[in-house]
Image: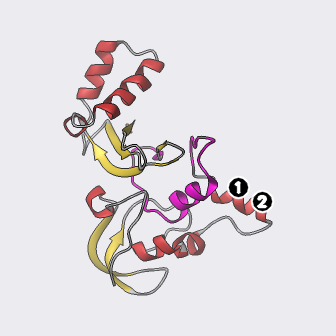
Amino acid sequence: MAEPTFRYHPDPLATGSAVPTEHVCSVCGVRQQIRYQGPVYGRQPDSLCLHCIHSGAASLALSVSGGGDGDSDMAAMFSDAVDVPDDVPLSVVEEITRRTPGFAGWQQETWLYHCGDGAAFLGPAGYRELEAHPEALTMLREDRRRHGWAPADIEQFLRGLDRTGEPTAYLFRCLHCNTSLASWDIS
């Protein structure tokens, strides 16, 4: 069975959110070849496949919302979405939070949005990887400027970004205008 594709996380193997290893998925009970290893916000499964994430079966099976009226279920469904712009439809937030592989960060990861839609997560990045994405570096500079950092401190910080260490950046791409976006994180 071919692995599913995800609009907002196009290559979970390349980003490290999934690994090629044979396992039996705790949700569907099927022997699979790719195992998800990113964060799960709910009951923790022993093993999880990308098919159950894609279909939404994992979200339903592992949810901790507990049911109830539609309004409280809807509020619980989006409780792990952070800083979502007003122009992003709830259906996009639902797809990202319930049917898209997440990614592990030092703190709680934050998905980025652009052009009224979720952006595609491309993976962790250090300064070397970000040099090919000047818009992402500009975004990180602006973030630090808003927090009152001096230009020299900002540049030192950016050059210290490490794809596998800390601080690290997370690279995204807008699905509409192809703008490169980034956030950063540290333990």
The residue at 46%/62% (across/down) is 100
Q: Is residue 186 above or below residue 109?
A: above
**Label 1 belongs to which residue?**
75
At which x and y percent is residue 108?
48, 46
Q: Label 2, label 1: how many angstroms apart (C-alpha)?
A: 6 Å
**Label 2 belongs to which residue?**
71
- The three-letter amino acid code for the residue at tag 2 is Asp
At which x and y percent is residue 180?
35, 40
- Mainly helix, strand or loop, the magenta region? loop
Viewer-closest of 2 and 165: 2
Q: Looking at the image, can residue 47 be seen?
A: no
Kindly indicate the quadrant of the structure image that contains residue 78.
bottom right
Viewer-closest of 20 and 54: 54
CB atoms at circles 2 and 1 under 8 Å apart?
Answer: yes
Q: Residue furthest right?
A: 69
Q: Secondary structure at mark 2?
A: helix
Q: Is residue 54 magenta?
A: no
The C terminus is located in which quarter? top left
At which x and y percent is residue 86?
63, 41
Q: Is residue 163 above or below residue 22?
A: above
Q: Is residue 66 above or below residue 154?
A: below
| The magenta segment | 81-110
Q: Is residue 173 above or below residue 51?
A: above
The residue at 41%/23% (across/down) is 142
